[in-house]
Amino acid sequence: MISNNSEAVVDLNRLHLSFDGQPVLKDLSLSVFHGDKVTLTGPSGSGKSTVLRCILGLVMPDSGTITILGEPVTRYNIWQKRRHIAYVAQEPDLGTGSVKAVIETPFSYRANAGLRDNLARLPEIMERFNLPKLLLDKQINRLSGGEKQRIALTIAILLDRPLVLLDEASSALDTKNKQAVADYFKQAQNTTVLSVAHDSDWLGFATRVVDMKEIQQM
């Protein structure tokens, strides 16, 4: 999938990246379009999570280009580009305090001030993700891994970003809750999702499954 495609939400064009002389990404090109639900698969070390980190600007490729919403990403504009992205890790760092406070904190930042009304959707999303209302009063560090993942996913949804990056973000969920999350994103037609996952339950949610070995010249 060759890039420079202005219609893609995120476009990766011939990315190369090495760590300690070992190639992690080699000639990787991928376009993810509006509303796509793309899942990256491949063995450990094939660069799946590295792709997400490159899009976030946490790692800069040795060569190649990354375009988000039609504009190339640079060291100078990556902070601006992150405003279009929500990211959920396998083990999300949610800080400390009550669940309610953790959810509300991102909306106290100036960049998200205009999104505060989205918190009105919180009860609906929690219900869909099988999270009881009483959970809001619990301390975040008392939650299970699966509960933390669903809270992180809830925050990502409320931030209303056009691009959502999920790095094994459903790994701690049982089949029922994994399906609830997958069903939500399936119905979110205006949300583009690029995820990393292995299990068959999650792969069934994707509109496109991409094997990292197949799209790289390793």
Image (cartoon, rainbow, N blue to C red):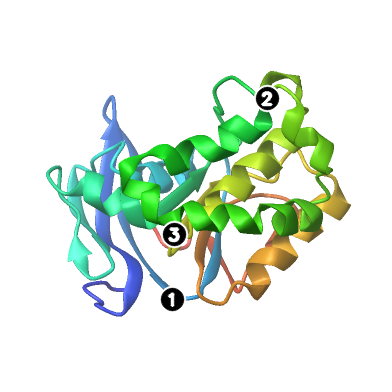
Q: Which mark is residue 161?
A: 3
Instruction: Find disc 1 in the rendering and name its residue.
Output: 34
* Above or below 93: residue 68: below
Secondary structure category for the residue under label 1: loop
Q: Work out which quarter of the rendered image holds the N terminus and state it.
A: bottom left
Which residue is farthest bottom? 7
Chain-order first, disc 2 or disc 1: 1
Work out whether residue 85 or residue 196 is closer to the camera in this orientation and state it: 85
Work out whether residue 56 or residue 39 is closer to the camera in this orientation and state it: 56
Percent position (x, y) of residue 100?
Answer: 65, 35
Circle 1: residue type: His
Secondary structure category for the residue under label 2: helix
Work out whether residue 82 or residue 3 is closer to the camera in this orientation and state it: 82
Q: Residue at x 26, y 72 (%)?
A: 3
Circle 2: residue type: Ile
Q: Residue at x 51, y 68 (%)?
A: 191
Residue 176, picture quadrant: bottom right
Circle 3: residue type: Arg
Is 117 left, or right, of 16 in this rendering? right
Instruction: Find disc 2 in the rendering and name its residue.
Output: 140
| Residue 26 in sight from this viewpoint | no
Chain-order first, disc 3 or disc 1: 1
Q: CA distance from mark 3 to mark 1?
A: 12 Å
Is 64 left, or right, of 188 in this rendering? left
| Residue 82 in sight from this viewpoint | yes
Q: Dot 2 surroundings within 10 Å: few (below 14), some, or many (20 or more)?
A: many
Task: Look at the numbered discs 2 and 1 and tell me whether their residues touch, using CB distance below 8 Å.
Answer: no
Percent position (x, y) of residue 184?
Answer: 69, 65
In this rendering, which labeled residue sits more in front, label 3 or label 1?
Answer: 3
Task: Look at the numbered discs 2 and 3 and tell me whether their residues touch, using CB distance below 8 Å.
Answer: no
Q: Dot 1 surroundings within 10 Å: few (below 14), some, or many (20 or more)?
A: some
